Amino acid sequence: MGNCLKHFKQQLPSIAPKPLIIPPIFSESESLQIRGLKKATKKFRQDRVVECEDYSVRKFYKGYIDETTFAPSRAGTGIAVSVMECDSSRSLQDWMAVVRSLGQLSHQNLVNFLGYCCEDNKPFFLVFEYSHKGSLDSHIFGKEEEALPWEIRVKIAIGTAQGLAFLHSIKNSPLNRELRMHNIMLDEQYNAKTVLSRTNQTKLGR
């Protein structure tokens, strides 16, 4: 019996995984090339990884691109690039749904979604604006940060409320009812920009 089982196993044909077929993505966002993202992030070097306190979240890489042409630039617009492996049709569909959803949202108090990149047999990428002042929790609980003045705190609170009001005004809003300080990013002028945590974009800055 043992020899029969062994012989049967040897006769099994090897089944190679089928490559994912990427359908067209109808989104208002910019379709970027992996070659440009590699150059913008210095080939995704380790020192370009954005610090992240939630280790369940995938990595983000900091880079710079030209604001108009989206070409890599040494002193351009800061970006945070998310890397995602799509190893099944389901994960591909989920990723495409995220791209379409983010491409339809635009508000001054939401982290700006700049574009995406998907090429055959390669990881997929989401590209967001980089928040130079980091997350709100790093300023409230961080030991190295100076205390935020009250006028700045009020400004952040108002900006956050405006972002939430916009999301609540949308039918089938992607807001997942969980707002935390690490989901509130700050730009150079301390303008609050809410992160849609359903897409797991919890660290897009320092």
Image (tube, rainbow, N blue to C red):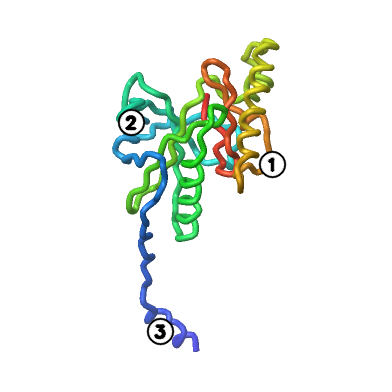
Q: To which quarter of the image does residue 183 belong?
A: top right
Relative horizontal placement of residue 44, taking residue 193 as reference (left or right): left
Mark 2 sits on what residue? Answer: 70
Estimate how packed mark 3 is, as few (under 14), some (14 to 19) or many (20 or more) residues with alpha carbons within 10 Å: few
Per the model, the C-alpha gap separating discs 3 and 2 is: 57 Å
Amino acid carrying label 2: it is: Phe
Task: Check residue 37 in the rendering and tell me which mark sits there, or answer none.
Answer: none
Between marks 3 and 1 in the image, the one whose residue lies nearer the viewer: 1
* Residue 51 screen position, x and y as percent: 53, 29
Is residue 190 placed above or below 68 in the rendered structure? above
* Residue 63 screen position, x and y as percent: 39, 28
Between marks 3 and 2 in the image, the one whose residue lies nearer the viewer: 2
Per the model, the C-alpha gap separating discs 3 and 1 is: 56 Å
Is residue 12 placed above or below 205 in the rendered structure? below
Task: Check residue 177 in the rendering and tell me which mark sits there, or answer none.
Answer: 1
Amino acid carrying label 1: it is: Arg
> Which is more N-terminal, label 1 or label 3?
3
Q: Residue at 57% across / 17% down in the picture? A: 190
Choose between 84 and 24: the one closer to the eye.
24
Is residue 206 placed above or below 57 in the rendered structure? above
Per the model, the C-alpha gap separating discs 2 and 1 is: 33 Å
| Circle 3 SS class | helix
Task: Check residue 7 in the rendering and tell me which mark sits there, or answer none.
Answer: 3
> Which is more N-terminal, label 2 or label 3?
3
| Circle 2 SS class | loop
